[in-house]
Amino acid sequence: MNPTHIEHIGIAVANLDEAVKLYERCFGLKCYKVEEVTDQKVRTAFFMVGQTKIELLESTDPEGPIGKFITKRGEGVHHIAFAVNGIEEKLKFAEKEGMRLIDHVPRKGAEGLDIAFLHPASTGGVLIEICEKKNS
Amino acid sequence: MNPTHIEHIGIAVANLDEAVKLYERCFGLKCYKVEEVTDQKVRTAFFMVGQTKIELLESTDPEGPIGKFITKRGEGVHHIAFAVNGIEEKLKFAEKEGMRLIDHVPRKGAEGLDIAFLHPASTGGVLIEICEKKNS
């Protein structure tokens, strides 16, 4: 995989507006974008911390992935995203290594990234996303 | 707080040696240090990803914080650490903002950092550490 950096940390929150206020007031971070990803049934808010984004995720549907996560585990870290170069090849490598993939081909995520998730069963319990910004 | 970057992401693992092999083989990361923190009842392994460390944490005692975490929630992300400047002042600010602190004064953590934890009840369900490298 050879990730270049942690692209973002995805955090499931029950109420996006309140969580944005908390991160701005208590951590002095500035929300630079709120984006709805209808495909994933989430509303997201982004903050930059060094070279890594904090991505807060509020479910727009209790049956969506974040809705189910919060029902099961409560608010908290949902996933970590590694920035990679050549995401298609990295997915092929992961498959060859016997890792369980959630996405076998990349799809579009927030911020225009090509993204793919690896199953936590193959990564020591952590939901890991790999992602690539193709047009930068 | 105004963190400068994500210093590390702490991940609770059941078996450190196996997890190190997984991160090296599947993610192409290089473990640069294994360190035991007796105070926290953990053995830790570090990897660098851009400006952020991945810190794998294996409990050396089922009654330690990581042992209890794994019993309750299984393996996964345990905490996120923000690098700050002036950790003592940042703790005073957090207290003034009404945040619940786990550590009211900084203590020594892995890698010689001054560290302090904020309670997840005040941070939207995420265990957040703030930390500072004093002699760099």
Image: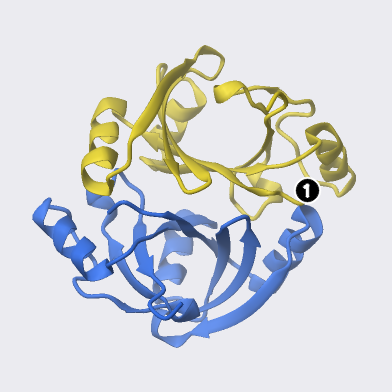
Chain colours: A blue, B yellow
Give residue A28's quadrant in the image.
Answer: bottom right
In front here: B124 or A93? A93
Under mark 1, the amino acid is Met
Give residue B29's quadrant in the image.
Answer: top left
Residue B68, x across and y down, in percent: 46, 29
Residue B116 in sight here: no
With respect to residue B17, does A86 lie above or below?
Answer: below
With respect to residue A114, does B116 lie above or below?
Answer: above
Q: Which residue extends farthest top?
A: B38
Give residue B84's quadrant in the image.
Answer: top right
Q: Is residue A60 left or right of residue A135?
A: right
In front here: B112 or B68? B112
In front here: A106 or A118? A106
Residue B50, x across and y down, in percent: 48, 49
Residue A128, x across and y down, in percent: 35, 56
Task: Answer few, some or many: residues within 10 Å of disc 1's Cα (few below 14, many 20 plus, some between 14 and 19).
Answer: many
Which residue appears at 19% of the width and 65% of the height?
A: A89
Q: Which residue extends farthest bottom?
A: A38
Q: Which residue extends farthest right?
A: B96
Q: In this figure, which residue is indicated by the disc labeled 1?
A: B1
Which residue appears at 22% of the width and 47% of the height?
A: B26
Pointer 1 chain: B
Q: Secondary structure at mark 1?
A: loop
Residue B35 in sight here: yes
Where, quadrant-wise, is the N terminus of chain A in this rendering? bottom left
With respect to residue B132, does A44 lie above or below?
Answer: below
